[in-house]
Amino acid sequence: MPAAADLSAPLRNEEIARLFAPLRRFSHVALAVSGGADSTALMLTAARWRDLIPDPPRITVLTVDHALRPESREEVRLVCERAQALGLACHILRREGPRPRSGVQQAAREARYALLGDWCAGHGAALITAHHLEDQAETFLMRLARGSGVDGLAAMSTETFLKESKVTLLRPFLDIPRARLGATVRAAGMDWIEDPSNADATYERVRMRRLLPRLAEAGIAPRDIATSCRRLHRASEALEQWSASFLSEHLVCHVTHGWGEVPLQPLLQLPQEVRLRIFASLLHTFGHPRRLRLAAMERLDDWLLHDTTRAHVLGGARLVRRRRVLVIGREPGRLHAQTPLEPDQEEVLWDGRFLVRVPVPHPPLVILPLGSITLPEDFPDRPSGVPAFAWRTLPVICSAKDRRPLACPATDWRAARSEPAEAVTVFRKCNDISG
């Protein structure tokens, strides 16, 4: 337990060196800076850390203009001005599109992480955020109010891998109180930008923030909540390793046709919590990438254990009992992917599942699901064992002009005298689940 005086003291150099030590393994790190007290402290301490060590990584400041308030353009300009005064490169990322009609904070968060993740992926950088102790406690309370399970209540971790952007996210301040970050900025003779939404009680996080002092009076301090989060995270990691080990041993992924199967007997012998994780991994791989609610996974588990119907549809995927195995693939009724391939474009990720490669140059093309087009007479029959629903979700390369099918690499079929002469599809997502 830190001394009372330390709870609002500026960060010392030795603390900064310890907090930022995990960043040394990266050649390039990007700081997410809004200009508020917490992220300004991150920028200040990162600059100090750079000067404390030999051969520091390259440090870039990223600031996002959400275009939700008139002041935002000036605020991001100020962030870059301060970053450059500290000797740090700065880039402004701007959200495009109309203002969200509802769920403004959530929409802003999603847009922010998409922009930050894409930039970091394109520049080989790890992403660093200024989340702190009270942020962790607020996140826990928000998820508690939703009835979250182990993963949700574990809240944030000090290091996370963002699967969609393939970027590592680090939170060096997760155990540091908010007051110490503000004190660090003031000790440097700087101020920060106050976002008025941080005082707007219509937002859930603000309401949880106001609840923290009352919980502390009852003996439940943010640090106590953060301790529980760390322990839940430890349990979450153990469960994740268990489910990953099971999938590595038992999942058969038919990469050519984009479907998978898992033996039912060992699956049904697992504890429910592990089965739910396996469902989540399977749905992410064979369905759409959106995270599903725990209640939906529990209904899926109930279907598997007790329902007599043969099939269940969830998360853009279809699950079917077939003899002694559970078969899973993309649900064709929910698939409307129509992806253009321009003449100078060599590859495209279709439906988030298949990487389609076509040698350039080629005529304008469009990738369509097999089940949505009229197949020619010489198109091959569905192989024995391949589920009909999975067959209908294979990518077919078609002419963009008249949508005439030209090639289906998964079946080795190609229209006579057609372009492209060669094409390749790779079911990319099976690598994620089995690797």
Image (tube, helix red, strand yellow):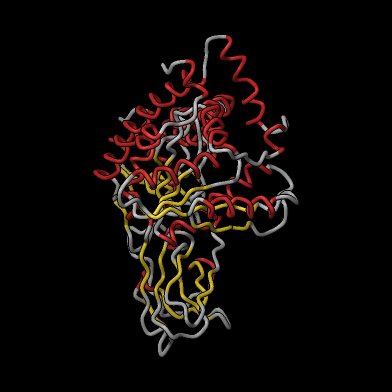
**How many circles with numbers are drawn on the protein?**
0
Q: Residue at x 36, y 46 (%)?
A: 322
Q: Residue furthest left?
A: 249
Q: Looking at the image, which residue sits at the far top?
A: 218
Q: Nearer the viewer, residue 435 or 392?
A: 435
Q: Looking at the rendering, in which quadrant would you find the N terminus?
A: top left
Tell me which residue sits at (41%, 90%) in the image.
417
Q: Is residue 271 above or below residue 67?
A: above
In this rendering, the answer to whether 430 lies above or below 176 is below
Q: Position of residue 361 (x, y in %)?
A: 44, 86
Residue 306: tell me if it is visible. no
Q: In the image, is residue 211 above or below residue 266? A: above
Does residue 13 sit above or below 145 in this rendering?
Answer: below
Where residue 177 appears, as percent x and y from the top left, is 51, 26
Residue 184 % position (x, y): 52, 33
List x then y, in percent, for residue 300: 47, 36
* Quarter residue 265 falls in: top left
Whether residue 435 is visible to the viewer of this picture, yes or no, is: yes
Q: Residue at x 73, y 49 (%)?
A: 69
**Residue 287 horizontal side relative to residue 92, left or right:** left
> Which of 3 and 401 lies nearest the eye of the viewer?
3
User: Depth check: 254 or 350 in front?
Assistant: 350
Query: Which residue is at a point 59% across and 50% down the rendered structure image?
Result: 79
Quadrant for residue 53, please give it: top left
> Viewer-proximal residue, 309 or 79?
79
